[in-house]
Image (tube, rainbow, N blue to C red):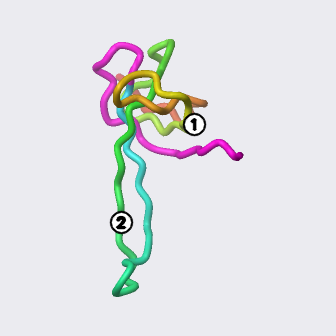
Amino acid sequence: MAVKERVGIVVSDKMDKTVVVEVSNRVPHPKYGKIVGQTRRYKVHDEENSCHVGDRIRIQESRPLSRTKRWMLKDILVAANQP
């Protein structure tokens, strides 16, 4: 079985060892066929607290780590410019 991976933008890094990642996807509407945007937010485990708001990261599905956390950080693709 293939491991699910997603690419998204970090929108919150206020929790310890956890970031919130927003993943956007464009899919056709089931009835009308128009392309519409979908957005999902995932809680992601970040062991070293290395992610910051604005980073573009790749995440990977994992075993449940808490009640809402089911994803782990795989790698940081583009780091945000932090002042």
Amino acid type, callout 1: Gln
- Residue at image coords 59%, 44%: 5
Task: Give the numbered dot on residue 37.
Answer: 2
Query: Element type at marker 2?
Result: strand
- Residue at image coords 65%, 42%: 3
In the image, taking residue 25 as reference, residue 12 lies left or right, namely left
Q: Per the image, is 30 magenta?
A: no
In the image, taking residue 4 as reference, residue 68 lies left or right, namely left
Direction right: furthest residue: 1
The answer to whether mark 1 and mark 2 are in CB contact below 8 A is: no
Q: Residue 47 location in percent, x, y? A: 50, 14
- Residue at image coords 60%, 45%: 4
Direction bottom: furthest residue: 32
Query: Circle 1 is placed at which residue position?
Result: 60
Vertical placement of residue 62 versus 83, above or below: below
Q: Which residues are magenta?
A: 1-18
82 or 25, which is in the foreground? 25
Q: For mark 1, does the 10 Å Cα neighbourhood hold few (<14), some (14 to 19), or many (20 or more) residues? A: some
Vertical placement of residue 50 versus 60, above or below: above
Vertical placement of residue 58 versus 49, above or below: below
Q: Residue 20 location in percent, x, y? A: 35, 33
Q: Residue 8 location in percent, x, y? A: 46, 44
Q: Quadrant of the C terminus?
A: top left
Query: Element type at marker 1?
Result: strand
